[in-house]
Image (tube, rainbow, N blue to C red):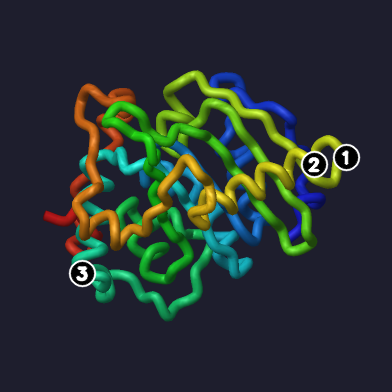
Amino acid sequence: MDFKKIDFINVEYRNQLQDVVNEFYIPVLSEAKVYKRAVGYFSSELLIKISKGIGRLIKNGGTIELLISPELTPFDYEALKKFHDTKSFFENKIQLNEPLTDDIESLDRLGLLFYLLETKKLIIKFAILKSNKGSGIYHEKLGVLHDSHGNIIAFTGSSNETGAAVDLNYEAFDVFMSWKNNQDFTRCNLKDMAFSRLWNGLDNAIDTIDLSEIIQNKLLKFKLKNSNFVLDVDEYHIQKKSRKDKPKIPE
């Protein structure tokens, strides 16, 4: 678990010019101990795309902390609500006592989301503007990763944590590595502290709310065809499986 073992990390990525999944997400996640991500929009569809990296992060004993606005796709809204209501919805579908392998991508999207939530490898919190009058949302795009040697990678740019952000849109983000130089060291630590303030509810502009609280108070909402997810619309439907034991979107 050492970022310095990665052959090469760019200081800038543009998704239409580079394969950001295989050139950034998977190599970096594979060496990470903690992945912290704060974005305006999230789709569990991305979890499948980067699942090989997630699988290795989990094998490292790692965790994912995800802070997002409560603007979800219908798929993820229903999935998170069902998880909150049942907790063990997939206990007979996924053997949580078996070690996770790099073949985690063989699980479908919903199964992977529930696996990560049930094992507490993924913790989701929601950011709501304190001054929100119905039109503004938390819209930052920040990523911070730690390895087991104290190294930090921080990245920031236009990309949300969605499938469209790595495949369809034109997105770019800058990368900072704490071991490269003093400027990057400072930037990584500033980004890490900013995430910690948000995550722990210490940012004066944001209310940070746990998943259970936001669902109980019916604050969770989702966008339809007129949302920023329009480019992703076809990706939010689980394909019907021939195998009956495959998880499907809850009804």
Q: Which residue is mark 1?
A: 182
Left or right of 209 on screen, residue 11? right
> How busy is the neighbourhood of tag 3: few (under 14 within 10 Å), some, or many (20 plus)?
few
Asked if residue 230 is positioned above or below residue 60 in the image, the reply reads above
Type of residue at label 3? Answer: Thr
Q: Are marks 2 and 3 in contact (CB under 8 Å)?
A: no
Earlier in the chain: of badge 2 and badge 3, it is: 3
Q: Secondary structure at mark 3?
A: helix
Judged by depth in the image, the label closer to the viewer, 3 or 1, is 1
Please identify the quadrant where the C terminus is shown.
bottom left
Q: Residue at x 38, y 64 (%)?
A: 117
Q: Gap in Å between the C-alphas at discs 3 and 1?
A: 48 Å
Q: Gap in Å between the C-alphas at discs 1 and 2?
A: 6 Å
> Horizontal and vertical percent for residue 175?
70, 34
Type of residue at label 1? Answer: Asn
Q: Residue at x 63, y 66 (%)?
A: 60
Res 63 quadrant in image: bottom right
